[in-house]
Image (tube, rainbow, N blue to C red):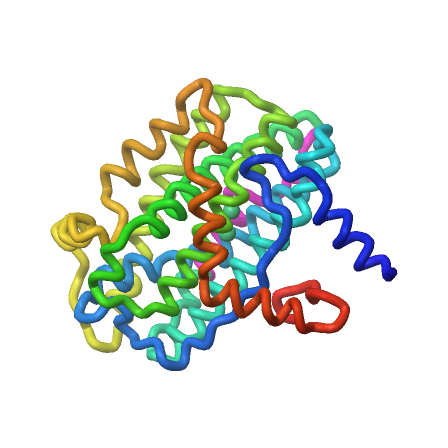
Amino acid sequence: MSTTQVASEARQHRTVREGHPDRRRMVRFDWSDTPLHWVPGDPFSTHMVNVLHLLLPAGERWFIGVVTEAKPFVKDPEVLESIGPFVQQESWHAWAHAMVLEHLAAQGIDSEPFTKALEQWFERTGSPKPGWPKALQRWWLHRRLADVAAIEHFTAVLGQWVIKNRGLDYAGADPLMLDLLRWHGAEEVEHRSLVFDVYQDLSGSYLQRCLAMAFVAPSLLAWWLRGVRYLMAHDPTSPGRPGWRDWLRAARQYRVPGPWMLVVTTPLRYMRPRHHPSTEASSELAQQYLAESPAAQRAREAAGSAAGGPADGPGA
Ligand SMILES: [Fe+2]
Ligand SMILES: [Fe+2]
């Protein structure tokens, strides 16, 4: 038996904690038939959700960097073992969303100026500080981990939201895009506790957790609104400027998450002293979706038929 097969068997037989991932699913999508407004007749909802394609590739690569930096300091062996599959899942998510950006570019929306600005922001607010004293570097790592844990709270909540809500189905949204969103959402629910547990293992400060959410929630909202304005402004069909009424209307139709959920209830739940992500969403619901997702089914078949098991990277 090869080393890869032994490692894969060991992974299959290890105990995976609630809210931790055990493996990635190498899903692929062919976007050639997906229309520009994949929510028919609703450019606002289309672009409000498209913002995720702008934010996630840079965001998830940043999560991977922070968690990888924290890995040597993790003491809990179960948490440590789940970091590998977490990194694999997030890197596949980043790649899958980046593919949609190429499709948007082919349809006339160049996202590069926006994603460059976002990467520069991550560089300014979240890069390592190797020149700092050791104690400050450690605090800086804890601060960034707390930020990633807070964002992972949003991704789990949004993941559960997109799996459960039927507003986009009723609107006749492109099934491929829905599958991408729900596959990603389901894996976010599946690994929702990992970064929180890494943070608890390294720091666990309740004050820092709350401060992180106080920083992350308005930042996320600001980037989201900036993203939807950017996409609407660069849409070749000139759908006009997005407004608050558009958001409230789309939220009422369950096509996008509403401002109340995004700005108030989700951050407040995270600030409960006894909060733990394992109580936030349903692993069962996520696994149920992953069992029926067309893309995940294709990935399972491809992995089953590939000689030597799954390959190692998104480009493989
Ligand atoms: Fe992700
Ligand atoms: Fe995640």
Looking at the image, can residue 149 be seen?
yes
Residue 117 placement, left or right of 224: right
Front one among 261 and 202: 261
Say if the magenta span includes residue 125. yes
**Foreground residue among 20 and 251:** 20
Magenta segment: does it hold 47?
no
Q: Residue at x 46, y 76 (%)?
A: 30
Is residue 195 visible from the viewing direction of this image? no
- Examine the rendered structure and indicate whether residue 163 appears above or below residue 236: above
Residue 312 at what x, y percent from top left?
70, 63
Q: Which residue corresponds to the image point at 47% horizontal and 72% vertical from the top-left?
A: 29
Residue 35: which quarter of the image?
Answer: bottom left
Residue nearest the viewer, comparing 246 with 17: 17
Please give left or right for residue 143 compared with residue 282 in the image.
right
Which portion, as a residue range, is magenta? 116-133
Residue 180, by quadrant, is bottom left
Quadrant of the image for the N terminus? bottom right
The kind of secondary structure the magenta stretch mainly shows is helix
Q: Residue visible at 40% across and 63% down?
A: 179
Q: Quadrant of residue 95?
A: bottom right
- Please determine whether, in this image, residue 116 is positioned above or below residue 284: below
x, y percentage for residue 6? Answer: 82, 54
- Tally the marks: 0
The reply, left or right, for residue 159 in relation to residue 195 is: left
Give the answer, above or below, for where 153 lies relative to 31.
Answer: above
Looking at the image, which is closer to me, 11 or 242? 11
**Quarter the C terminus occupies:** bottom right
Say which residue appears at 51% left-offset and 40% top-offset.
192
Q: Position of residue 9 (x, y in %)?
A: 76, 52
